Image (cartoon, rainbow, N blue to C red):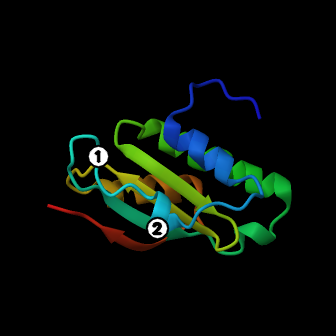
Amino acid sequence: MNHTIAESRATRRLRRRTALAPAEPLWKRVPLRDADGRLLADFMMLIPRLSQRPREQVEQTVQRLQQVLERYRHVVVFADLNLKLNVLWVSVRPAPGICLELATAINLLVPEARLVAHRQHP
């Protein structure tokens, strides 16, 4: 895939997760705190039947997700796309309303994506 913008760590992780390879369970990989020890906020989105689509459509969806994550690279700490479960998990630095704002931005480019749950810490 050709990209004209520099990739953040979050988008590189997302790209690696789209490869068909086993990985450690999410609960072992998701960061709970940032480098300063502050708790992170996170959310999960369901993208129904993504894994059943043709590879080109999956790649287009991944590119759209990468666009949004790159735009929010200042707050995105971790992103994981699980194609087996059709679930996107994103961990962010806490900021008022950031989970809903980012989920909305994702939904604008990936309309079928649905916010399942989010967790904000004080």
Direction from residue 39 to residue 49 in the image, left or right: right
Q: Measured from the top left, where is residue 66 in percent x and y?
A: 58, 43
Q: Residue at x 28, y 52 (%)?
A: 33
Identify the residue position indicated by label 2 in the image.
27
Q: Residue at x 81, y 66 (%)?
A: 53
Q: Considering the image in quadrants, where does the C terminus appear?
A: bottom left
Amino acid type at circle 2 is Trp
Q: Residue at x 23, y 56 (%)?
A: 39
Identify the residue position indicated by label 1 in the image.
34
Q: Measured from the top left, where is residue 95 in percent x and y?
A: 22, 50
The disc, 1 or 2, on the residue closer to the chain's N-terminal end is 2
**Label 2 SS:** helix
Q: Considering the image in quadrants, where does the N terminus appear?
A: top right
Question: From mark 1 to mark 2, how far is it between C-alphas?
Answer: 16 Å
**Label 1 SS:** loop
Corner quadrant of residue 32: bottom left
Q: Measured from the top left, where is residue 60 in percent x and y?
A: 73, 49
Answer few, some or many: residues within 10 Å of disc 1's Cα (few below 14, many 20 plus, some between 14 and 19). Answer: some
Q: Is there any visible trace of residue 108 in the rendered image? A: no
On screen, residue 15 above or below 111? above
Amino acid type at circle 1 is Asp
Q: Nearer the viewer, residue 6 or 68?
A: 6
Q: Measured from the top left, where is residue 113 in percent x and y?
A: 56, 66
